[in-house]
Image: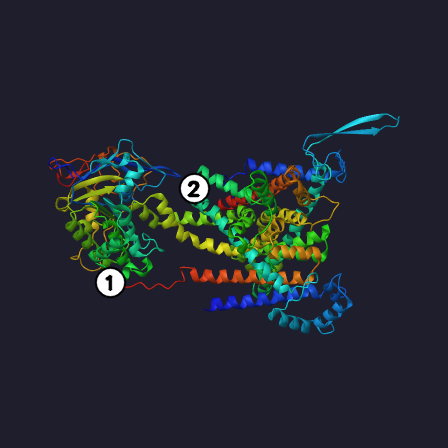
């Protein structure tokens, strides 16, 4: 957390991060509409080309003439001559999909379990906490590797496996908040007015847990993107031909000495995206804390 | 102490659950498990042996108990590829992973200590902000990217260290350490942030204490006040954070070992996954997880023991 | 203290202001303090909490928090050197060696993770550069001098194994280790048991005489300075409001605040269950700049002039007895 988060406002870095994420999200969503070479189109004349390399294509037109079409590889090409920009944008789809969808699983399932555990206490709480402990007993990456190994490397399985892993973390945060909230007066007051458990949960507890949980969720998203990157890097993520940032970084490894950009550009993009989520999550958390402390 | 007793109970329960889950990993697969364990190169004889071993006709709980019996005796099966006993394969590689973990934590401390001390001493100064921004940025870098960055910097550009390759300790201590430097650095460059933050927070509290003012009143120079008076009371949380980090460290070790081709447990696991060597996978998961749980429990107990509030006080009349 | 004769005083404090910056503004915690201390003499500094006496002590030792500014033309001359203009490194050679301080709360002023003996030897080793063995022997002697029985055993113990009284004796040992010429005792007994207080104060008085040390004894209890100090200064709201040789002060109280402090001391001759005569009201908020005498709102004998003009500290008939009041009880 930056030491200069003494500011009560969301600073410039916050909005820059939001801007970056918007750029990434929009590019990913509109991937197919861009006038870019297909992400799996190999250009054997321009392997591991530097950013800015120009490519001339001779295209046969209807009238039998050869037309020169120029294309500039804005960020260069990878080891098989594929356009990096195109691959980045398509890879963004995977990263964002995994990054945003997996935490949702943890958010809903883990959040719900945590709230219930924190509210009802007793044996039920003990059971949930014990189950979470067992999941947490396995070092994260090890468990992730094994689950994806068993389920098979499809996008759906990846999202589910990662999502499953986030359940304990979310449940912990939700439970802690619920425990703190249950002690507060407005919950006691609701009880006294005869409100049933379900009502209290839905009206008082859950709305107040949602916001901190969502802010925490942003940090989880950042972590998920890194985790997906690691898996793809190891070759255990979404399989070819779909590009992924981690996979691109792995591919660039063999030319790290001559053409570092092949690895470093996707690495940089991933870094910026993860950093943005961290900045936003952190900024919102400080902002929320400042708001509540002024109450 | 019943607190320790309770923790011991919890520890045993978790370990039991872990063994059950790892057992199920191999034994609830669809299809004939013996073929899967045997792998693609198994002969029908091998399959028959496996069948007998597993006692596939018996109830799953019976099989679990039998398996546990074998595990406790050290028999984790054999790798179908190399026919090497799983336990041996793992134990051979354990020292490498341990050495990696130790060296990387040491390097992380080396980075975190001065950073934490300085930023606590001069809070909100330029240096403090720089350190915290640097820290914030570094934890947004995944370990495999950090590994590539260190390779690019130190191996390719500066040519100081080799990118891969491992020399066992007995063949040359210095070469051995050198083969761990880059991998450990990749991990340390990320892990230092957590340590630094914890230390900074503790130090800030400590520096506000009266006894620090007293130390200054003795005329001691700032460095002595910081290191001899402020550091020790602030290190308690640091020690416990160490333990908590092991989980992340294990994950990073897996990746880093693979990238730098270090023959550790992480690499064994990854290669087993590529080769679908089920029994190795099972053995690795079992041992890594039990080790992880044990370390966490030890740290848990240690914290109870070291907490000065629990230390008995015997004020004497005077 | 007024300078007597031509010998230079050990400590000469002139016009010291200290401004503490807080979120609500700048507080003038020490407001134009001047006094002189001769070698071997004791000055009692008395005042309520918040009157600035601890701040003054810190200013003398150079231990102010970072957000404090000392007035530009202030001087603190100690053995001829102006401590305020001395570079930090040189100041550190004086602090702890020639000038030392005992803090108020012995429960928090000792480092909990370092052995008691080591906390004393480190001063000796740092300032006098002697070796560990010699330092240890000297510390054992010191521990005996401050009245700690079984010094060998206590040397190896940690602070939490000692009682409050013993800890304060250790703090005194730390302060006296290098035989300082000036000892500042900031409310040394306030945090201690009543039964132990007299012991510690007597110990300080005895040590001061033996070693011919100058001492500033800071307290909120006027009764403490009686018989133990050569001169007493009474502080209120950052200023000195009355100053005199101690016996004269008790004999001829001039300023109403001092009178009130005197009255507040419970006396053995009072019948049981006599109510404590506490001073009504609160010390002033140092942020505001109110005209007139700062004690006026709480003074029983306040007149109209007190609220408009601030009285200056001056002696009338006796230059050694100074006070800041328009309507003192006696002429001084």
Residue B230: image location, x then y, percent: 38, 49
Of residues B214 and C227, the one nearer the viewer is B214
Which is closer to the viewer, label 1 or label 2? 1
- The number of numbered discs placed on residues in the rendered structure image is 2
User: What colour scheme does the image use?
Assistant: rainbow
Residue bearing the label numbered 2 = B123
Could you tell me if residue A58 is visible in this image? yes
Mark 1 is surrounded, within 10 Å at the Cα level, by few (under 14), some (14 to 19) or many (20 or more) other residues, namely few
Answer with left or right where residue A136 lies relative to residue A2: right
Answer with left or right where residue A119 lies relative to residue B43: left
Is residue A186 placed above or below A273 in the rendered structure? below
Element under disc 1: loop
Residue A101: image location, x then y, percent: 68, 49
Chain ID at mark 1: C
Q: Please tell me which residue is depicted at 72% across the width and 41% down the height of the picture.
A: A90
Is residue A124 placed above or below B261 in the rendered structure? below
Q: Which mark is residue B3?
A: none
Answer with left or right where residue B105 lies relative to residue B218: right
Is residue C154 placed above or below B116 in the rendered structure? below
Residue C96: image location, x then y, percent: 26, 46
Where is residue B276, by image quadrant? Answer: bottom right
Could you tell me if residue B245 is visible in this image? no
Q: What is the distance, in whole Å, between disc 1 and disc 2 at their CAs?
A: 43 Å
Element under disc 2: loop
Residue at the limit of the structure toward the right, as seen here: A63
Q: Which mark is residue C150?
A: 1
Of residues A281 and A87, the one nearer the viewer is A87
Mark 2 is surrounded, within 10 Å at the Cα level, by few (under 14), some (14 to 19) or many (20 or more) other residues, namely some
Q: Are marks 1 and 2 in contact (CB under 8 Å)?
A: no
Residue B222: image location, x then y, percent: 35, 43
Quarter holding the C terminus of chain B is: bottom left
């Amino acid at each position: 957390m930056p030491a200069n988060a003494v500011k009560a406002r969301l600073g410039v870095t916050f909005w820059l991060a939001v801007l970056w994420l918007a750029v990434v999200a929009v590019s990913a969503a509109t991937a197919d509409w861009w006038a870019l070479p297909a992400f799996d189109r190999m250009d054997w004349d321009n392997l591991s080309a530097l950013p800015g390399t120009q490519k001339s294509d001779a295209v046969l037109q209807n009238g039998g003439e050869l037309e020169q079409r120029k294309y500039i590889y804005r960020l260069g090409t990878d080891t098989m001559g594929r356009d990096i920009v195109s691959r980045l944008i398509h890879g963004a789809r995977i990263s964002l999909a995994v990054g945003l969808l997996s935490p949702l699983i943890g958010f809903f399932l883990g959040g719900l379990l945590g709230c219930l555990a924190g509210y009802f206490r007793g044996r039920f709480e003990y059971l949930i906490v014990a189950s979470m402990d067992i999941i947490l007993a396995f070092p994260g990456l090890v468990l992730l590797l094994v689950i994806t190994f068993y389920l098979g490397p499809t996008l759906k399985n990846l999202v589910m496996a990662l999502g499953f892993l986030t359940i304990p973390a979310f449940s912990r945060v939700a439970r802690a908040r619920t425990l703190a909230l249950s002690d507060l007066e407005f919950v006691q007051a609701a009880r006294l007015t005869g409100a049933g458990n379900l009502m209290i949960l839905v009206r008082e507890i859950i709305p107040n847990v949602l916001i901190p949980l969502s802010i925490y969720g942003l940090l989880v998203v950042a972590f998920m993107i890194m985790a997906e990157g690691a898996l793809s890097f190891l070759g255990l993520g979404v399989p070819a031909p779909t590009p992924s940032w981690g996979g691109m970084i792995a591919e660039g490894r063999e030319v790290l000495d001559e053409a570092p950009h092949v690895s470093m550009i996707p690495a940089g993009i991933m870094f910026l995206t993860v950093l943005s989520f961290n900045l936003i999550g952190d900024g919102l958390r400080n902002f929320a804390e400042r708001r509540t402390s002024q109450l | 102490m019943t607190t320790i007793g309770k923790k011991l109970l919890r520890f045993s329960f978790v370990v039991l659950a872990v063994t059950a889950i790892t057992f199920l990993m191999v034994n609830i697969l669809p299809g004939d498990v013996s073929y899967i364990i045997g792998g693609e190169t198994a002969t029908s004889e091998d399959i028959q042996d496996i069948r007998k071993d597993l006692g596939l006709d018996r109830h799953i709980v019976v099989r679990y108990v039998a398996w546990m019996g074998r595990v406790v005796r050290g028999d984790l099966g054999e790798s179908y590829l190399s026919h090497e006993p799983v336990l041996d394969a793992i134990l051979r590689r354990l020292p490498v992973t341990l050495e990696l973990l130790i060296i990387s934590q040491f390097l992380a401390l080396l980075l975190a200590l001065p950073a934490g001390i300085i930023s606590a001493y001069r809070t909100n100064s330029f240096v403090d902000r720089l350190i915290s921004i640097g820290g914030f940025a570094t934890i947004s870098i995944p370990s495999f990217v950090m590994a590539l960055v260190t390779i690019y910097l130190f191996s390719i550009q500066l040519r100081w260290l080799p990118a891969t390759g491992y020399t066992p300790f007995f063949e040359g201590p210095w070469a051995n350490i050198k083969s761990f430097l880059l991998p450990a650095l990749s991990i340390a460059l990320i892990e230092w942030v957590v340590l630094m933050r914890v230390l900074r927070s503790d130090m800030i509290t400590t520096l506000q204490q009266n006894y620090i003012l007293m130390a200054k009143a003795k005329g001691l120079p700032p460095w002595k006040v910081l290191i001899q008076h402020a550091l020790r009371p602030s290190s308690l949380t640091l020690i416990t954070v160490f333990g908590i980090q092991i989980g992340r460290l294990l994950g990073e070790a897996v990746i880093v070992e693979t990238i730098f081709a270090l023959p550790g447990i992480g690499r064994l696991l990854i290669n087993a996954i590529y080769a679908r060597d089920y029994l190795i996978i099972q053995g690795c998961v079992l041992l890594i997880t039990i080790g992880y749980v044990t370390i966490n429990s030890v740290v848990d107990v240690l914290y109870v023991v070291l907490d000065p509030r629990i230390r008995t006080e015997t004020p004497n009349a005077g | 203290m007024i300078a007597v004769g031509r010998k230079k005083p050990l400590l000469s404090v002139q016009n010291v202001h200290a401004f503490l910056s807080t979120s609500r503004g700048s507080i003038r915690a020490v407001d134009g303090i001047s006094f002189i201390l001769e070698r071997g003499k004791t000055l009692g500094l008395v005042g309520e909490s918040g009157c600035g006496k601890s701040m003054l002590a810190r200013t003398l030792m150079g231990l102010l928090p970072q957000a404090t500014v000392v007035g530009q033309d202030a001087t603190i001359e100690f053995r001829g050197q102006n401590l305020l203009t001395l570079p930090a490194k040189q100041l550190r050679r004086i602090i702890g060696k020639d000038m030392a301080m005992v803090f108020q709360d012995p429960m928090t002023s000792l480092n909990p993770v370092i052995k008691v003996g080591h906390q004393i030897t480190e001063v000796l080793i740092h300032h006098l550069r002697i070796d560990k063995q010699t330092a240890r022997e000297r510390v054992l002697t010191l521990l005996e001098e401050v009245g700690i029985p079984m010094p060998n055993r206590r040397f190896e113990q940690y602070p939490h194994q000692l009682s409050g009284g013993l800890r304060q004796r250790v703090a005194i040992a730390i302060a006296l280790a290098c035989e300082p010429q000036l000892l500042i005792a900031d409310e040394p007994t306030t945090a201690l048991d009543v039964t132990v207080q007299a012991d510690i104060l007597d110990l300080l008085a005895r040590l001061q005489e033996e070693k011919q040390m100058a001492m500033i004894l800071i307290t909120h209890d006027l009764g403490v300075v009686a018989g133990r100090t050569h001169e007493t200064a009474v502080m209120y709201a950052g200023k000195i409001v009355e100053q005199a040789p101690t016996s004269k002060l008790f004999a001829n109280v001039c300023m109403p605040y001092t009178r009130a402090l005197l009255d507040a001391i419970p006396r053995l001759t009072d019948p049981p269950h006599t109510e404590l005569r506490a001073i009504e009201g609160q010390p002033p908020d140092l942020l505001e700049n109110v005209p007139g005498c700062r004690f006026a709102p709480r003074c029983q004998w306040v007149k109209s002039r007190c609220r408009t003009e601030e009285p200056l500290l001056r002696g009338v008939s006796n230059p050694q007895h100074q006070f800041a009041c328009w309507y003192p009880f006696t002429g001084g």
